[in-house]
Image (cartoon, rainbow, N blue to C red):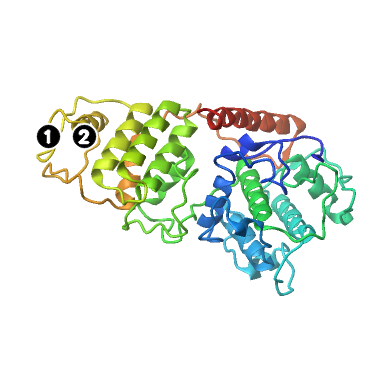
Amino acid sequence: MLLGKKEFLAGFLMAALAGIAAFEPLSAMASAKMSLTPEIAFSQQLGLFSDLKPGSKTLNANISEADFQNGLGRVLVETGMLKSSDRNELEANGIIGPELPKDTITRQDACEAILRTVMFGWIQDSLPRPEEISSSASFKDWQPDAKYGPALDYAMLAGVIQGGSDGRFRPDDNLKVKEALWLLKRLYDLILENGSAQRFALFSDVPQDHNMTRPLLNLRNAGAFDLTNLGRKLNGNGKIKVLDLGLAIQGILARQEKTSHIKQIARIMKNSGTWRYANRKTLAHMAAVLAQATPHSETNLHILYSDVKPGTDLAESLDILAKASIRLGYNNNLFAGNEQISRFEALGVINSIISELEPGPEQPEIETPRTATSADMEAFITRLRSKRERIHRILNRN
């Protein structure tokens, strides 16, 4: 496989799949239970494909140039590189041309758009331009225009663009949906890993100044959206299914490598019925598991709920939450366990539990350098490989 000078992958769950060609992701992932799930959820939240699922025939369909450009624009908005994903802004910044989009897009055209994005990132200081970079990268069947040389070398070094195991790129082949998702997700992770200011734009109905924006960012950073897709619109006052509630909590537990707790959540999901809408009782049981797995300060608070029988499993779960200073139900101590809950309520409770997750060591504030040295790149590669190995262990546990 042609990998350039170095090989590294950005992201969390995606990092567990290192060594797979960027444009042939599914061929070596057939046995993976969570194949492409992060990328599919990511694409749905960007508003690209609302009904896309692992194994879907759509994955192997050609992606239109308009859909690819739309996805690229949304990635740049989400990472803060652009203020709008409108085609006019993409064109104004030299990322796409003025031509009307076609029904399909070739692999070469898609990658050249990515390379122009890299060059735009260098100009805007959204991506650090390494001091040592060549322009000699090429494939057996594709010699890029000379102006793309440094950007291609950088993209291959970063693992964003790769060829096949035979050193060929197949530039004239139509880009598939699965290939586009893989490409856009890697670009997204690369930009964020290099310190770009991330905006919250995953849910179009949650503006920047919404009171749930900060909790949602906290949840995403903790892994709540790694395994589930809640849609382009959150619809926070709408109901949440047991499946989505359970997967949100399992995503957080996976980041913490809490295998036994993940299994507990799976049992609760099965007993509650994954197809049902979650009620407050289900939320209490799942939230208690998360609270037990998550580092937090405990209190001696004890809440008596007028409609909960002492000594039951539910009472035990509520007691665990009370010690974490979390009250469910109503102010008159009515729990209403069979009442279906909203997405805002569910996510708010989860956020309250994880808000005390131990932060990493505080880093001094320094000015972001304009260039990245070889040592910087090596340190970046080491961090990502460590993430890859940690997530790989989680995914391979029974």
- Tag 2–tag 1 contact (CB < 8 Å): yes
Is residue 356 positioned above or below 275 on the image?
Answer: above
Q: Position of residue 368 (x, y in %)?
A: 64, 40
Report the label total: 2
- Work out which quarter of the rendered image holds the N terminus and state it: top right
Gap between marks 2 and 1 measured at Cα: 8 Å
Describe residue 59's horizontal placement relative to residue 339 as left or right.
right
Q: State the residue position of label 1.
A: 309
Q: State the residue position of label 2.
A: 314
Q: Residue at x 54, y 57 (%)?
A: 52
Describe residue 66's horizontal placement relative to residue 232 as left or right.
right
Q: Position of residue 51 (x, y in %)?
A: 51, 60
Q: As shown in the figure, which amino acid type bears the numbered disc 1?
A: Lys
Q: Position of residue 227 (x, y in %)?
A: 49, 44
Q: Residue at x 79, y 46 (%)?
A: 163
Describe residue 283's horizontal placement relative to residue 216 as left or right.
left
Q: Residues within 10 Å of mark 2 (few under 14, many from 20)?
A: some
Q: Position of residue 281 (x, y in %)?
A: 24, 42
Q: Residue at x 55, y 35 (%)?
A: 365
Q: Residues within 10 Å of mark 1 (few under 14, many from 20)?
A: few
Foreground residue, 125 or 64?
A: 64
Foreground residue, 363 or 163?
A: 163
N-terminal of the pair, mark 2 or mark 1, is 1
Which residue of the protein is positioned furthest toward the bottom in this rendering? 100
Q: As shown in the figure, which amino acid type bears the numbered disc 2?
A: Leu
